[in-house]
Image (cartoon, coloured by chain):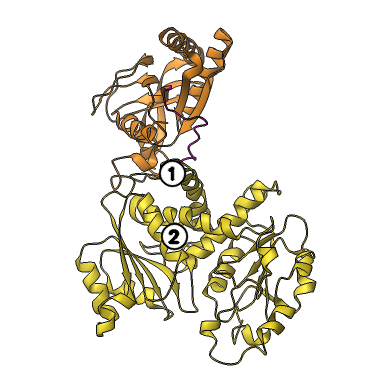
């Protein structure tokens, strides 16, 4: 791929495996007393967030600092965007300051591609665009599944097979509004996993033509055969119409309640991209049980983003193309 | 392989073509044996010693040295590994990807560290390794053991323990393994 990370499909299976191998090294760096290496000294990374975010922005900025890069933070609410400055002017102003990478989040699908076309030097990293893609989330999800399965002594895939070979993964909930689901489906299936989407018809995309997935509306029948259940946040802020009768009804049918969590097999992992609506898509007790790796996902987020920044800015290698 | 060699070798660059064998397996074994004894002689407090093999060429030499020291003195020596990719100063000149995660099992404060690598050449890998070590604690002293010193230093760095001093040309390549030491050339793939 180029110097940008816009879609998870830029990487392909080999690229994802390469990022995961590099992430192992950065997990070690993060575990040290002084979790910092000089690899990106003198580089400047800007986080350009037009949409609210806690974990993704902090995660990218922490990752950049641990690589000794300089970090500039841009948030739309406290900038000249309020005075009516256009996206293009904003981006060109930032480029004129001499930077090396821009981490973009925007409510409009495709904005990172547009930003990449406007910029001549810097790398662009997509940190979430509308309902479309969130590639670093997919990378950290793949890494977390691989790491937690190794830690729990699960059988490794056969030599030469991809990292998630043959695993059954269900993505449950608001698929329609979820960029995480779109990137995860691409990443999980390219690493050899079988993916089932579980959601009420109103929360599925209008068309699933070409998606390499199965669809189910019955969570109870899917749970027993899963290796990973991936719960999505119910995105109340993106729900423009009445897609659900009520939150209680959603929880009763699609929430991972304590009773439902018992249907999961031994060693099955519970994941969630955060922030969690406790008691809606997943019960509070289930979040805290040992099979839940939700906080591990956040911890791995920093190491994965260090790997991505290092590959784009420091390593001097081209990421493998799809 | 040392960093510089690795940069030139597959998958990054050319193909290594062997020319002359300068040390046989037996010579490598003897050199390891001698270096282990020199390490014992110079360091009274073996329990405070840590052998750190540089990824990837120094790792097997470090564990071999530790084994010999263990056999001779019946004292166990701590062994670690270090990958210096993130500490190098030649980003942009060539690809730099770590080969494996670093593993240093003890706190280095007030310990003596012996860095172990296969080939000492420009000294830039060792400079990077010294930077990396300081992030794991303040070692009381750092020593350097290499199987081959091939000259052409670009920094004020010298080894404490050497398997063999080997004059080379800059365009040659040195390959070190348990089976022996071979000088060769890098040919375009």
**Circle 1 — which element?**
loop
In magenta segment, residue B134: no
Figure check: B34 above or below A315 = above
What chain letter is assigned to the residue under label 1? B
Who is closer to the viewer here, A153 or A158?
A153
Figure check: A180 above or below B154 = below
Who is closer to the viewer here, A281 or B7?
A281
Labels 1 & 2 near each other (Cβ < 8 A): no
Q: Name the residue tied to disc 1.
A: B11
Local packing at callout 1 (Cα closer than 10 Å; few below 14, some 14-19, many 20+) is few
User: Percent x, y for residue B122?
Assistant: 28, 29
Residue under the image location 31 percent in, 26 percent down? B121
Figure check: A2 above or below A221 = above
Residue under the image location 51 percent in, 12 percent down? B26
The numbered mark at residue B164 is: none
Chain B color in figure: orange
Q: Name the residue tied to disc 2.
A: A59
Find the distance from the CA under tag 1 to the CA under tag 2.
32 Å
User: Percent x, y for residue A2?
Assistant: 37, 63
Q: Quadrant of residue B146?
A: top left
Whether residue B60 is visible, yes or no, is: yes
Query: Predominant secondary structure in magenta?
Result: loop
**Circle 2 — which element?**
helix
Q: Which chain is yellow?
A: A
């Amino acid at each position: 791929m180029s110097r940008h990370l816009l879609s998870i499909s830029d990487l392909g299976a080999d690229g994802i495996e390469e990022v995961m191998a590099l992430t192992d090294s950065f997990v070690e760096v993060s575990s040290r007393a002084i979790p910092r290496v000089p690899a990106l000294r003198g580089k400047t990374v800007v986080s350009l967030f037009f949409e609210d975010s806690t974990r993704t922005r902090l995660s990218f900025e922490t990752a950049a600092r641990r690589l000794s890069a300089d970090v500039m933070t841009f948030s739309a609410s406290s900038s000249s965007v309020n005075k009516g400055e256009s996206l293009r002017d904003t981006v060109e102003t930032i480029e004129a300051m001499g930077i090396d990478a821009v981490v973009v989040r925007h409510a409009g699908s495709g904005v990172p591609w547009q930003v990449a076309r406007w910029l001549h030097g810097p790398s662009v990293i997509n940190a979430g665009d509308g309902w479309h893609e969130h590639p670093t989330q997919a990378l950290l999800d793949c890494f977390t599944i691989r790491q937690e399965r190794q830690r729990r002594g699960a059988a490794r895939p056969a030599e030469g097979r991809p990292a998630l070979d043959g695993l059954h993964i269900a993505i449950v909930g608001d698929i329609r509004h979820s960029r995480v689901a779109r990137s995860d489906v691409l990443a999980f299936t390219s690493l050899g996993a079988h993916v089932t989407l579980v959601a009420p018809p109103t929360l599925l995309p209008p068309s699933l033509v070409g998606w390499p997935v199965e669809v189910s509306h019955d969570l109870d029948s899917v749970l027993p055969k899963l290796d990973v259940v991936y719960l999505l946040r119910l995105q109340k802020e993106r729900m423009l119409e009445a897609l659900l009768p009520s939150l209680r009804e959603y929880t009763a049918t699609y929430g991972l309640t304590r009773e439902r969590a018992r249907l999961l097999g031994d060693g099955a992992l519970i994941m969630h991209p955060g922030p969690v609506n406790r008691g809606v898509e997943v019960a509070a007790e289930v979040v805290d049980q040992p099979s839940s790796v939700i906080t591990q996902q956040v911890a791995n987020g920093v190491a994965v983003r260090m790997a991505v920044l290092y590959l784009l800015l420091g390593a001097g290698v081209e990421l493998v193309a799809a | 392989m040392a960093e510089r060699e690795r940069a030139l070798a597959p998958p990054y660059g050319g193909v290594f073509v062997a020319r002359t064998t300068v040390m046989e397996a037996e010579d490598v074994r003897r050199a390891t044996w001698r270096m282990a004894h020199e390490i014992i002689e110079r360091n009274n407090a073996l329990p405070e010693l840590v052998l750190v093999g540089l990824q990837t060429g120094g790792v097997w030499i470090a564990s071999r040295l530790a084994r010999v020291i263990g056999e001779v003195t019946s004292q166990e020596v701590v062994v670690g590994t270090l990958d210096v990719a993130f500490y190098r100063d030649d980003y942009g000149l060539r690809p730099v990807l770590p080969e494996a995660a670093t593993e240093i099992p003890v706190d280095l404060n007030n310990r003596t560290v012996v860095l172990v690598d296969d080939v000492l050449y420009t000294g830039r890998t060792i400079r990077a390794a010294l930077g990396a070590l300081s992030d794991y604690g303040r070692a009381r002293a750092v020593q350097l053991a290499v199987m081959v010193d091939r000259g052409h230093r670009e920094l004020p760095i010298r080894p404490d323990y050497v398997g063999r001093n080997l004059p080379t040309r800059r365009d040659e390549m040195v390959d070190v393994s348990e089976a022996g030491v071979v000088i060769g050339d890098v040919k375009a793939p």
